Image: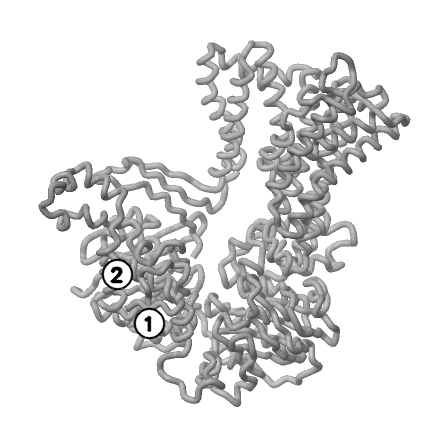
Amino acid sequence: MTDDLLRMESIVKTFPGVIANDHVDLTVRRGEIHGLLGENGAGKSTLMKVLYGLYTPDEGTIRLDGTPLRLDKPQDAMDAGIGMVHQHFKLIPRLTVTENVVLGSREPAASFRKENVGDGLLAGLRTSAPVQAVASRFSLGLDRPKRRIRTLADQYGFNIDVSAPVRELDVGQRQRVEILKALYRDVDLLILDEPTAVLTPVEAERLFETLERLVDDGLSVILITHKLKEVESVTDRVTVLREGADIGTVDTADVGRAELARMMVGRDVLFEIEKPNTTVGDPVLEASSISAADDRGIEKLSGVNLEVSAGEVVGVAGVSGNGQTQLAETVAGVRDPTAGTIEIRGREMSEASPDEFIEQGVSFVPEDRHENGCAGGLSVMHNAAMKDFRDDQFGDSVLFDYGSVGEYASRLVDDFDVRGVSDVTDNCADDLSGGNLQKLILARELARDPDLLVANQPTRGIDVGAIEFVRERLLERRDQGTGVLLFSENLDELFDLSDRLLVMYEGEIVLRTTPEETNKKRLSVEMNGGGSKRVSVPDDPPEAATRRAADGGRSDR
Amino acid sequence: MLVDIDVSAREETPSWVAYGTPLFAIAAALAVSVVALIAIDVNPVAAYVQMFVRPFGTVSTLSNVLVRATPLILVGLGVYLPMKAGLWNIGAEGQLLTGAIVGTWIAINVSLPQAVLIPVMLAGAAVAGGLWAFVPALLRAKWGISEIITTLLFTFIAADIQLYLVRGPMQGGSGGFPQTDLLPGVAEFPAIPGTRAHVGLLVALLFVALLYAVMRRTRFGFRVNFVGSNAEAAEQAGMSRYRVYLLTLVAGGALAGLAGISEIAGNQSRLHASFAPGYGYTAVPIALLGRNGVSRMLLAALFFALLFVGGNRVTVAMDVPAAIIDIVQALVILFLITAEFFQRYSLSVSVDRGDDGQTIQGTEVSADD
């Protein structure tokens, strides 16, 4: 076919003991958004690293526009017209947008460019080879790139000040800088590796609009994801990988979500979760007018009242940065409140240390698994026992019995289906994929039979199979009488799991409701502060206005 | 560029790499050192035999190595323990000096029977070393002030106090040398029969065993490992970073203090202005090489002792300048520490056809998805 831009045929890539890609085919047409779907560890990133010249395939061919490619390094891929936006941005915060974009392909300063030299006295000197050689290495002309970047940004509606340092941009804007980097190099094919993992739902919508405009202009886009919803809403075709194998390529319009999930996981996945009614018991958490500050001492939580009872799930919604993190940390006992009181099972705990909260039956699944949830360099065994190591079952007051800790860890690994662990003492937590690490953390927190579970974004960045598992376990705990405080940016999740719903905005709870009494639209409005302060909601989300204000009123035009 | 170097993380470290690289690194360092030896007309083979084989020749030469190893083991532990908690006790030298000063003072000024005096000296030295580490430990635990800087500055203070004491209040002996009186006989550590090695070695081995047990068999060891690996997560799990920092650094100081008195009472018999040629600093690479386990740290300390003793032999027997031996020793340490990189990363070098001036791509890649 003539409209095929990229053909990867029969790609094989093995690592010691693992076949990461087993004869995978991928064909991308000109002007389409092509989804690459699979669970964590299915081989998506490996395939894309092959395409971007980071890995050399063991077998297989890559053709772009019919021309066979040999990609030994990313520069080869860029030269061929392939650009990639990595999940973790490769930007230098101190440099401006323009400097970041031209990094690696800069131009000499204006006075050394041939068309600007003119006929002056020094013209001959400026164009001489040695001067040019020095100029191209040591001078930097940003005027022309800046104009071009600004044009590109305007063309695609990016709301970015090209002379602002990257550190002043929010995550969504930084991602757009990464896209600009690729566009500046005139790519035909743009790869995005899980681009929405770091974005809020509103920002994700904007990203998809951008992608639509790019393909309208003839670019092709490969979207790596494990989110079915994204595949459905934005891709034209999708290729599914499972455990390194190529499950096939389908037109997105022809398949439903359940079918995609089955291709991806290899079995049927439940989207609707059974939520039996349970009886709500005594309060396990009573927080009254608590305030808290972030690490820089800026108040993020202002006088919140909150009660969670045994046997209920209380969901907290909010745009990230509105105090949810501080609320979660404060009631879990890892951050001291600046005011107010916290009672756990009737005991006053405002001044208590983290281990007293643990003793009192509080479990915590932190937002950042790697930063706060585990010690990546230590074994799975260490991490499984991170909180329960004080327990008498692991030896007497002097000696600590690593043998029984190992057995305990193996039991958790089996019970919670944590994959990728061959030996709990050999494998370290960093070896686990995101979903499996999250299962391990959840196993650790739930095995303690907690009275209160505080879970902050427990399903962020993990694949559908693991999400389903985590949600089922949360509800199971609720039915066994644990009070669950669930923070999530995923409204579907909050509606599916919660008995009661709270909305946070600027450090306060602005709405208390239940899933039955409200809907997602109402919630979104409240999350953006529109509930009490505005009567009608314009199409332009209020958040954009806040962001502009946060930019210090800088305008890009 | 014509040469393309590709560095990639190893999925697993094959066992031959794990055990082979240190040996290969030593061999490579010695091969490079040949240049320096030949330049001054020394037969490198003879020098290496003198350095690495002869010390094993007799009980007496071997015990020289053990004598040298004794303070290195103790002060090595003093750096190793805080390192497990994520702290750098760069100033072990200062803790060693204070331990030596206080231990010597007790030995000279307190009269007790030997069986009581020696434990008192050890205890005094340990307390002194521990106290010397206490202020940096407190500053680190309470306000996060870098222990790298503070322990080092405390070393300068200790060194100057020591110089003042051996020239002033504690000066003794004849001839006005900057040194104290000889220790009384009862204060000297008894030798292990048939060797020059002394009781200090037994103390050192006792603490190796003790630390092994603490790290592998107690909840405190579990806490230390956790705080050292991710202090933030450890704190959220209810472990006290404050306590772990304070305890490990103070215990480290105490161990370094023991190294000080052990060297004085077991080997040198008096406190001299420059009795410790940087043992506290040598302890840092020792702990670094042995950071994966107390037993490895013990091996590293023994190897360093061999390097020093062997180096002395070459200097004396073959009339080689000490500076050249320093170069050989430095190269061995440098190669050993560099070698750890190759245990974690594999390197492939290929020659590029090189049509244009492309740069080397050192891409850090990993196989996870």
Where residue B227 appears, x then y in whole percent?
A: 63, 51
Kind of residue indicated by mark 1: Phe
For residue A31, above or below residue A117: below
Q: Which chain does the numbered disc 2 sit on?
A: A
What's the CA distance linking mark 1 and mark 2? 20 Å
Q: Is residue A93 left or right of residue A368?
A: left
What residue is at 26 percent from the left and 45 percent from the top? A139
Local crowd at mark 1 within 10 Å, few (<14), some, or many (≥20)?
some
| Secondary structure at numbered mark 2 | helix
Q: Which chain does the numbered disc 1 sit on?
A: A
For residue A137, above or below residue A328: above
Q: Is residue A497 left or right of residue A8?
A: right
Q: Name the residue tied to disc 2.
A: A149
For residue A381, above or below residue A474: above
Residue A37, picture quadrant: bottom left
Foreground residue, A279 or A157? A157
Kind of residue indicated by mark 2: Ile
Foreground residue, A420 or A498? A498
Q: Name the residue tied to disc 1.
A: A208
Q: How is the image coloured?
A: one colour
Local crowd at mark 2 within 10 Å, few (<14), some, or many (≥20)?
many
Q: Residue furthest front?
A: A121
Where residue A224 appears, x then y in whole percent?
A: 36, 64
Q: Is residue B100 left or right of residue A209?
A: right
**Residue B254 visible in the shown view:** yes
What residue is at 81 percent from the left and 22 percent from the top? B188
